[in-house]
Amino acid sequence: MADDSKQATFERPARRNDAEGVEVKYCRTQDSRSARSDDQRMTDTAGTDRPTPDVDVVVVGAGIAGLYLAYRLSRAGYRLRVFEAADDIGGTWYWNRYPGARVDVPSVDYMFSFDPDWRRDWQWTEKYATQPEILRYLNHVADKHDLRRHITFSTRVQHADWDDDASLWRVRTDGGVEVTSRFVVMATGCLSMPKPAEVDGLERFAGEVYFTSAWPHEPVDFTGKRVAVIGTGSSGIQSIPVIAQQARELVVFQRTPNFSFPALNGPLSPEKLAQLTSEAEYRAAARMSFGGIPMMERSIIPTFSVSETERQQRYEHAWQSGLLFETLTVYADVGINPAANHEFAEFVRNKIRSIVDDPQTAADLCPTDHPIGMKRPCLDTNYYATYNSPHVRLVNVRKHPIRQVTETGIDTADESFSFDAIVFATGFDAVTGAISAVDFRGRNGVALKDKWANGPQTYLGLTTTGFPNLFFITGPGSPSVLSNMAVSIEQHADWVLDCLGHLSTGGFDAIEPTETAEAGWTQHVNDCADITLYPSANSWYMGANVPGKPRVFLPYCGGVDFYALSCDEVVARDYLGFSRSGPDGSRCNDGVVRRLQPDVEMVLMEAAALNLPPMESMPVADARALYAQMLAPLPPGPDVGEIADGVLPGAAGDLAYRLYRPATPGPHPIVVYFHGGGYVLGDAISDDPLCRDLCVRSDTIIVSANYRHAPEHRFPAAVDDAMAALRWVADNAPGLGGIPGQLAVCGWSAGGGIAAAVCQLARDMGGPVVVGQVLLMPATSGDTTSASYTENADGYGLTTPLMRWFYDHYIDAADRSDPRFAPLSAVDLSGLPPAIVVAAEFDPLRDDGEAYAAALDAAGVPTELVRARGAIHQSISMVDLVVSGAPIRAQTADALRRFFAATRTPELAS
Ligand SMILES: Cc1cc2nc3c(=O)[nH]c(=O)nc-3n(C[C@H](O)[C@H](O)[C@H](O)COP(=O)(O)OP(=O)(O)OC[C@H]3O[C@@H](n4cnc5c(N)ncnc54)[C@H](O)[C@@H]3O)c2cc1C
């Protein structure tokens, strides 16, 4: 937690005579005064007499976030006003008083961390506390720290206009009150805007109507009543078993079944309390954990790397754990690999089938329309078993749609039901609903609703361009609903407090993210989601539950820990991506905080943690052993139809090869593949996962041919062998199951350079005919002084010193312009086969690939250059580990199919 001792104020800072320490840079923010230069703006602003706002900070909402902000801001000396629509504190826990309402993260994890002496005056009675107990706790904290005095209750903020000249917000409430404030912090919650009931005729119903999200304060007694519950999300799943205990009849109307796990609630375990012995350490670990709960970390084990028996035991353990996050982290790839996800989902479906007696009800309760974990799973107490009670019935509204609510009940397409009460558990307009409900007007009068019409764009989920001094707590683009929100709320509020302190100290009174930073973060949030199965589920995470809401993945799924690192890095790099301004000038530090693909980032962090010595510092034999050791634990890649190992005649003796055959009926086209490894490392099977992947995706036979390595065999041994392999495969295509004439080459890294070279040799030597070349991050020039060698010299897997070491082992300086080593040096590139060249953004070899693609193109060779954004040299080869490489491999396979299709004659095809 940040230092509170600083007294801060946002009354206009005393004017300074010089712009000392204020660096003015060009920044792409939307500025109504943007026609003028930053220097002019500085002068203009300094000459303006800005009014002092009524308060420094307006906070909207008095749930956990609003209370924590009130505590921090008041202690730091800010003048603040908190507005809350409800007539008391608590937010979620004020509104959602339905029977069975509870947390789904352990209570001791779901609490404020700023009050380390909580145990003296607070005890949780259960592992998962009920709503009344949580609300009591929040009241206890509010009273203990005298927080209510900052809050204006029963007041909804409706409008907020940014006054650019005065550099403040004009905030208006439903009572018509206007308050001016330097900053606005939206602590309005992710799940506080209920969705309206989407049924016709509700106004006709003569019985009782309840919404779980606005439950009466007085107890509701369903004893002896006929009750309908509409909705089987978390609130439905929690309330249904409790309502069933009272009701005479209970009919549950279900549109989408959800996965739910037994909560196994009970008293707090001594083990859990023991973990909290060192409270400060425990809370710090929570902030640096995957989901905001310590000791529940991501698995790094891929599902199918362990035996079926072990997997079933692991699933059973998760089922018996009574911990939601445990079920989300069973194996590393459950959220990314459909086959892995299916297996775990099937385990849970089998559990449902084993609990529910009626096979049809069980079938209806089994979720089949979304991958497990990709909608928030639930924790329950006796949910599935409740359907075994004779007075409880499930109606699958996908098969029997609700037509209308009548005076006495509900009509489906084929049945009329009579009820005394209807309970709506139909969820929320999540994450953006409460923010968009306020009519925000930013710079130039732009409405936030318009800006976000196609989905929210934020920087860090905390801020948005064009709306200075507006902060969101757990906003879109932050871990929010994918985390223990108590932890995420504190992390966000702490960041905002630090930021306000920084502005005050620096003499600034406004902050706003740059367009570049916001676009970069939005891209990063999407990149994180795109490597997972999240986007494939029609969930409220995607806005899919609200008609007309843009289909965008709303939270940040990279984890609480990675997210916090980004926030910290932005601050450490002088508020990277933010523009700050004040009476004395402005400072802009434009940039993007996360440019690597998220999975690449993770792999690099794990590799860095191993602290391995650089390969170029080792004897060759040791480097080869280390390379093999690094490849061994990688996921194996997909199954192919057949794998056959053999030898073929090289230029100076036999060479090993491995053939990968698709499972589809042959004959197939053939690709001769040359492995990576800098001419020094690797062999015919060292790129096994990549070859399998290419085989399956392109439906092509891959023959991965070894070649002699340096330093034992220096240039041109490797390319001579490669040429020999190409000839042999061409000559033996029918015997290998190939289609004669349907021959392409592919290579990665040094192998990419070799593949390019053999295309030139085949052209010059009159054969064999090669119909396409796939060059993956190829070495094409031998030049280690290009920009990509400087920019990516270290820290991205392949380093510049290692490339130099490879080249020195392989080739004399005098030979380095020979096109058999540096195909880019060839005088003539015309007449070569069509090419696809992949260049990774963070790769010393990037410029080699790009230059060769440009040269091929200039020579009239049909060439596709794939610039792999956020990728490193190994992005393409780490199949199933670097999932962001999958679209590139798919593009590569598509190109291969095109090469073959373009040259396939009817005779060849038969
Ligand atoms: C039933 C339920 C169970 C949950 N269980 C968990 C759990 O186990 N673990 C977990 O991490 N999270 C859980 N959540 C998410 C939960 O919302 C957060 O954990 C947390 O309570 C959010 O706190 P908050 O202060 O950010 O927002 P909220 O608690 O939602 O408070 C926001 C407040 O802002 C007020 N407000 C909104 N708009 C305006 C406006 N324009 N003007 C004035 N006031 C306004 C609302 O009235 C509300 O009181 C649950 C949510 C629900 C609905």
Image (cartoon, grey):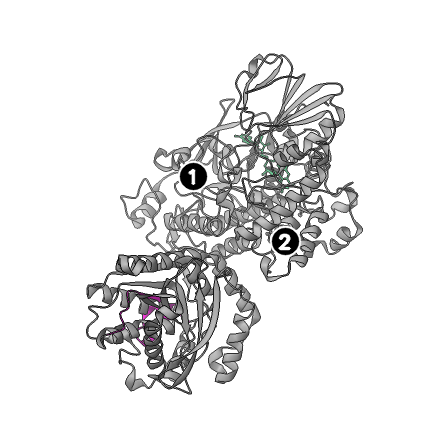
* Type of amino acid under label 1: Gly
**Residue 464 shown in magenta:** no
Q: Main secondary structure of the magenta part?
A: loop
**Which residue is located at x 62 percent, y 36 percent?**
363
297 left or right of 827 in image: right
Please tell me whether residue 626 is drawn above or below residue 554 in the rendered image: below
Segment tinted magenta in the rendering = 767-793
**Residue 770 shown in magenta:** yes
Image quarter where ligand 1 lies: top right
Question: Real-space Cα distance between discs 2 and 1?
Answer: 31 Å
Q: Please state which of residues 86 and 5 is positioned toward the viewer in this rendering.
A: 86
User: Where is residue 437 shown, x and y percent of the image?
Assistant: 48, 30
Q: Please state which of residues 855 and 598 is positioned toward the viewer in this rendering.
A: 855
User: Where is residue 613 shown, x and y percent of the image?
Assistant: 53, 77
Query: Can the viewer see residue 377 in this picture?
Result: yes
User: Where is residue 524 shown, x and y percent of the image?
Assistant: 45, 51
Please tell me whether residue 384 is drawn above or below residue 747 in the rendered image: above
Quadrant (top left/top right/bottom left/bottom right) for the C terminus: bottom left
Which quadrant holds residue 732?
bottom left
CB contact under 8 Å: marks 2 and 1: no
Which quadrant holds residue 671?
bottom left
Q: Please state which of residues 522 and 43 is positioned toward the viewer in this rendering.
A: 522
Q: Which mark is residue 330?
A: 2
| Front: mark 2 or 1 | 2
Please tell me whether residue 301 is drawn above or below residue 816 in the rendered image: above
Disc 1: which residue: 455
Q: Is disc 1 placed on a helix, strand or loop?
A: loop
